[in-house]
Image (cartoon, helix red, strand yellow):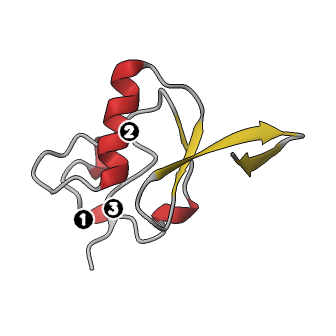
Amino acid sequence: MLRPEDCPRFKHCDAPLCPLDPQIHRRLWIAGEPVCRRKDIEAPLWLEMQRRYQKIGVEGYFKVGRDGKLKRYELRGGRLRAQ
């Protein structure tokens, strides 16, 4: 199984969500943060969604759901809650 460290861009990558991360469902992406730029892998649905959201200027907090889609979260009382 590949890990983020196996990516040739790992040392210079600032993307908080990595397609090679086995713990991807525990990670948080805040819209506006960097997105994976690798083009040599088949982009999962959540990565396509990130790229689309970046283009149209969507704001918010997101995690990758078990269905492979980005799920929006909101910050309430200092805690993240699913919308």
Mark 3 and mark 1: Cα distance apart in space? 5 Å
Q: How many numbered marks does the figure carry?
A: 3
| Residue at 40% from the left image edge and 61% from the top image edge | 68
Q: Of the numbered discs in the image, which one, if any, rests on residue 50?
A: 2
Q: Position of residue 70 (x, y in %)?
A: 47, 49
Lower position in the chain sequence, tag 3 or tag 2? 3
Lower position in the chain sequence, tag 2 or tag 1? 1
Q: Is residue 1 left or right of residue 34?
A: left
Describe the element under mark 3 as helix, strand or loop: helix
Q: Is residue 13 left or right of residue 28?
A: left
The C terminus sits in image quarter: top right
Q: Of the numbered discs in the image, which one, if any, rests on residue 28?
A: none
| Residue at 60% from the left image edge and 32% from the top image edge | 60
The disc labelled 1 sits on which kind of residue? Asp
**Tags 2 and 1 touching, CB below 8 Å:** no
Q: Position of residue 4 (x, y in %)?
A: 33, 61
The disc labelled 3 sits on which kind of residue? Pro
Mark 2 and mark 1: Cα distance apart in space? 22 Å
The disc labelled 2 sits on which kind of residue? Gln
- Disc 3: which residue: 4
The N terminus sits in image quarter: bottom left
Judge whether residue 47 can be spotted in this image: yes
Q: Position of residue 47 (x, y in %)?
A: 33, 47
Q: Of the numbered discs in the image, which one, if any, rests on residue 6?
A: 1
- Label 1: few (<14), some or many (≥20) within 10 Å? few
- Label 2: few (<14), some or many (≥20) within 10 Å? many
- Label 3: few (<14), some or many (≥20) within 10 Å? some
